[in-house]
Amino acid sequence: MYIENIDSFSTVAGGGFFAGILIGWALKKIVKLFAIIVGLFLAGLAVLQYQQIASIDWDKLEQASVGAVSAVVNAITKMIDDGHGQIAESAITNFGIPITSSMSIGFTIGFMKGQE
């Protein structure tokens, strides 16, 4: 009986670790791709303004981006406050601490290795 508990513990911890690595690696790649696209877009706008092809109101662009970021933060906060936190709570009670700790370690490793 003790051996069965070790098997389930190692399965949950190992699965969480590898899932965390994959999630961290993928998230790092998505963030880098998004940053490159936004950076190239803003550089293109700056070039168009420099060549006097377009006139860019940078203050208005900044206000729009701040509004978009605020909307995303508010949406995430609302999702957490509306009871979606219960899903994470039940996951912790069903799988225990091993999956959350191993997944967080795997996520950290995957996110760090996503630089390559």
Image (tube, rainbow, N blue to C red):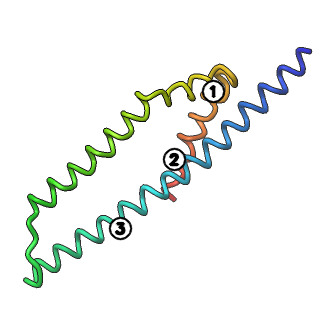
State whether residue 6 is above or below residue 27: above
108 w.r.t. 87: above or below: below
In the rendered image, the vertical position of residue 18 relative to residue 26, given as above or below: above
Residue wearing tag 1: 91
Instruction: Sort mark 2 into few (<14), some (14-19) or many (20+) by Cα contacts within 10 Å.
Output: many
Residue hosting label 3: 37
Quick one: SS at disc 2? helix
Among numbered discs 3 and 1, the one appearing first in the sequence:
3
Amino acid identity at mark 3: Ile
Q: Is residue 100 left or right of residue 116?
A: right
The image's mark for residue 111 is 2
Point 54% across, 24% down: residue: 86
- Residue 100 coordinates in the image, percent (x, y): 61, 29
Seen in the picture, residue 79 relative to 70 is either above or below; the reply is above
Q: Is residue 78 left or right of residue 20?
A: left
Which residue sits furthest right?
1
Indicate the position of residue 17 as horizontal and vertical percent values. 66, 38
Horizontal arrangement in the rendering, residue 17 relative to residue 56 (left or right)? right
Q: Residue sitting at 27 percent across and 71 percent down?
A: 41
